[in-house]
Image: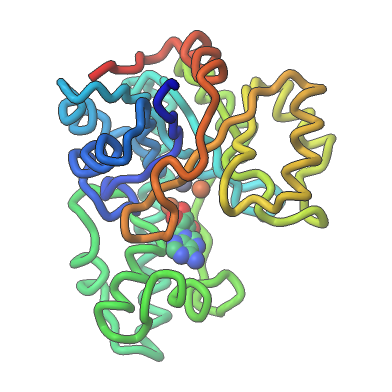
Amino acid sequence: MPRPIDLHTHSSVSDGTERPTELIRSAVASGLGTVAITDHDTTEGWAEALEAAEGTGLAVVPGMEFSTRWEGKSIHMLAYLVDPENLELREETLRIRESRLTRAETIVQKLAADFDISWQDVLAQTSDGATIGRPHIADALVARGIATDRSQAFHDILHPSSGYYVPHYAPDPLKAIELIRGAGGVPVLAHPATRGVDHLISRTNLDHLVAAGLFGLELKHRENDPAAAAILAEQAKELGLVITGSSDYHGTGKPNRLGENTTEPEVLEKILSEGTGSSAYSG
Ligand code: AMP
Ligand code: FE
Ligand code: FE
Ligand code: ZN
């Protein structure tokens, strides 16, 4: 039996709760054979993760989860094996991270009108240089006793319809695919069925993503709606897209457990032969 392959995890370099080193230790302890580190809009965790994997027998696929927006909706694009030094990719992800920072400050200003919370509280929950997001604000609300956990903070306070929400800059997914491909990477649409059958990506839009260079769909993910994922599975077959499965592990920040969804070894092989910007590391 090949050991399980989990291609979507976060460390504290974005909104996970474990350092890359701890994430690798957790992956080894969970019995994974391969893990991808896919922090939001950054490749900064790669070096530490690869170093931690040395001698463990765990393979690490370097990746990133690219924030994009299309027709007013947030869409996440997994990017495997990009060249982390690629200038265009670096500039665009820096622009997103900077916008995330000012946007988080604005959200906290709005919250401070109604709750006892400050920007310092959020910084106290954020690792230096990390890609900041609402999860860090959620952690600050929990530390202040305003929310019980991240899920409740999202549900009651940080939800887009809450009135405190502010969007951040993000390119459209066509642009993201162009940047990922330009950096030798492999683009896979993250959790594309979370909004259910009624709000599923249209076939026309999916065709546009495929024409731009989309390689796969992350259909095995706990937040995907099963009926919507089944529709996309049919379309993936027709369009020649690979299907991946992963946990979207965030440490203690989410209930998602490492290896709860996995990717077939044949699919991993296809991704590894497609990506030219960087290489997987066999620890
Ligand atoms: P942001 O990047 O600031 O828009 O926040 C989105 C991030 O929040 C996602 O990447 C998830 O990791 C996290 N998130 C969204 N909903 C929840 C939830 N209900 N509980 C915990 N984390 C969540
Ligand atoms: Fe996240
Ligand atoms: Fe995501
Ligand atoms: Zn994710």
189 w.r.t. 33: above or below = below
109 w.r.t. 5: above or below = below
Front one among 232 and 2: 2
- Report the quarter where the N terminus lies: top left
- Report the quarter where the C terminus lies: top left
Front one among 179 and 33: 33
Question: Residue at the location (45% across, 18% down)?
Answer: 183
x, y percentage for residue 104?
Answer: 38, 64
Question: Residue at the location (82% across, 42% down)?
Answer: 202
Where, by quadrant of the figure, is residue 84 drawn? Answer: top left
> Is residue 249 found left or right of 225 in the rendered image?
left
x, y percentage for residue 9?
Answer: 39, 42
Question: Residue at the location (60% across, 46% down)?
Answer: 75
Front one among 114 and 206: 206
Question: Residue at the location (60% across, 52% down)?
Answer: 74
> Is residue 29 found left or right of 236 in the rendered image?
left
x, y percentage for residue 235?
Answer: 80, 30
x, y percentage for residue 276?
Answer: 44, 10
Colour theme: rainbow
